[in-house]
Image (spheres, rainbow, N blue to C red):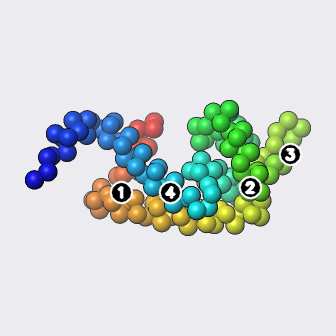
Amino acid sequence: MSEPVLAVDPLSSLPGYALRRAANAMMAELGARLAPLDLRISDASVLLLIAGRDDMTSSEIGKVLDIQRANMVPLLGRLDAAGLIRRVPIDRKSQAIVLTGAGERRLAEVRAITGRFEEDLMARIPAPHRPHFVPALQALVG
């Protein structure tokens, strides 16, 4: 007979710890699903965020995704090198990050993968809790 989870991991009853473990598990799974596209979760997040937009700067993308400027440079560099994004002047000081044709095609693949992932994730939540799941997470973000 196996030991109860609490005896093996006394931290498992702590909400913050459980949330971190769940987030790590879900991000690892999503990362594995995106790997065949040669994309990281942050790469896919940028593609999803800028889809259909022609006005988002790298600093705005960083703010929304909570990515430091120092990390935005290599992230956008990867997407640019892959031919998925390009920079378009907004004004004399700012450039928008927009999808290329290849970026639009990759976005369709990202949407299919993330859509299946989100469906699978929600299927793991007991049905009575599903309507409250995302609002509860959003309440933690503030």
Q: Is residue 83 left or right of residue 131?
A: right
Distance from Cα at disc 2 to Cα at disc 1: 38 Å
Distance from Cα at disc 4 to Cα at disc 3: 35 Å
Judging by the rendered image, the residue that carries numbered circle 1 is 131
Judging by the rendered image, the residue that carries numbered circle 4 is 32
Task: Please tell me which of labels 3 and 1 falls first in the chain.
Answer: 3
Residue type, numbered disc 3: Pro
Name the one closer to the observer, 40 or 137: 40
Please tell me whether mark 3 sits on a helix, a strand or a loop: strand
Q: In this picture, is 79 found above or below 67?
A: below
Judging by the rendered image, the residue that carries numbered circle 3 is 89
Distance from Cα at disc 1 to Cα at disc 4: 27 Å
Q: Does any portion of residue 56 appear in the rendered image?
A: no
Instruction: Please name which of the two marks, 2 or 1, marks the residue nearer to the observer.
Output: 2
Residue visible at 61% across and 41% down in the picture: 64
Task: Please tell me which of labels 4 and 2 falls first in the chain.
Answer: 4
Judging by the rendered image, the residue that carries numbered circle 2 is 82
Residue type, numbered disc 4: Ala
